[in-house]
Image (cartoon, rainbow, N blue to C red):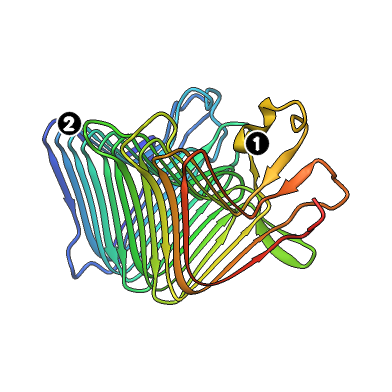
Amino acid sequence: DTGLTIFGIGINSVRGSHVEIGNVDSSATVLTVENKDENTARLQGIYAQDSSKVSITSDEIGLNILETIKRKDFLNYENYGIYATNNSIVDFNAKTGIGIYVENDYGIRADYSSTVSFDSDKIALTVVDTTNSSKKNYGIYAYANGVIDLNADSDINIYTENGLGVSSLFGATVSLNANNNYIETTLGKALNVQNYWQNMSAVLSLNALDSNYITAKAETLNGKLFGKDFAAYASNSGSISINAKNDNQLLGAVYSNSGTDTHGTSVSIKGNRNIVASNTVISNAGALQSDPNFSKNRVISALYAQGEDSSITLSANENYLSTFADSSVHTDLERVVWAYDGADINIDGFTSITTDSYEK
């Protein structure tokens, strides 16, 4: 067994160096990083930069980032569970499980052609907020051709408080492959993909042998669960692919907007049964806010696509699409499925579309 408690930075691999810990016979490798006092700028579990590599092999791997004392300058510095940058690699291989717990900021980040890859039976990533501030947290964050690839024989579970679940930005690629994928945010987009960069679109894929469960700020309304934020958000040549043998359950809106980009923006959801339940407000949907007759209205949608190069595709034996708007708020409009300004929405299979208030 390997168990370490460190202050500040756990493992720092720089300038082409290679750090290797454990082997297939190691039963557990656990790294905990804490801060001594409020003057600690940031906490980092694993930091690989400038063509470096960190490899950990063990039966079980644990990484904990604990902000035991609130940092005085937390608004200007970020904590990281794992951060790979500038052509670096972080590789975890664990037979039983990988568990990462981070207090504030980033769970896993890869940018500038760096790669983070996990292989295990189960993977759990938790990012919690202890600052009570407006600063956002990020579960998984891939940027500028970064690659994050997680593979689990059973489940992948990603939970983010006060922020975004999984982000792939500026030509980055994120892939989650498991029996079941669970993505949940308490406030913020669950899946977020944006921006074409260096001849590459940002890509995010979820592949489940069983089911995908994606939740963005869930709330029970009239006895049913709805998401109040975006379950899947793609813009400016971002691409999201969600595939399952059984269910795809999305609590929150599915959104595709090509903006000014022409390389194609898309969300594709395929399974035996697709469920989208939304209480999400689409800002300036259909440019209504520019119309004096509708400037005070808000639009709530389950599927919303905008722009000639944007699309949403649902394919399943059964598709269930629903929205909720408080019937006492007369300015809220429900548009369960809305394709605007040349966008395409294609739904294949039996489809049920329901609203809370048919009169508006």
Query: Observer-nearest residue: 164 or 309?
Result: 309
Residue 40 seen: yes
Q: Find residue 132 and name its label.
A: 1
Badge 2 amino acid: Asp
State the residue lying farthest toward the right: 328
Q: Position of residue 213 (x, y in %)?
A: 51, 65
Residue 283 seen: no
**Element class at badge 1:** loop
Q: Position of residue 234 (x, y in %)?
A: 44, 44
Q: Residue at x 29, y 40 (%)?
A: 201
Q: Residue at x 74, y 46 (%)?
A: 333
Query: Observer-nearest residue: 150 or 171?
Result: 171
Q: Residue at x 54, y 36 (%)?
A: 136
Q: Is residue 317 left or right of residue 335?
A: left
Q: Is residue 307 left or right of residue 291?
A: left
Q: Quadrant of the N terminus?
A: bottom left
The residue that disc 2 covers is 50
Badge 1 amino acid: Asn
Q: Is residue 205 left or right of residue 330?
A: left
Q: Is residue 135 above or below residue 264?
A: above
Q: Earlier in the sequence, mark 1 or mark 2?
A: 2
Q: Position of residue 128 (x, y in %)?
A: 55, 47
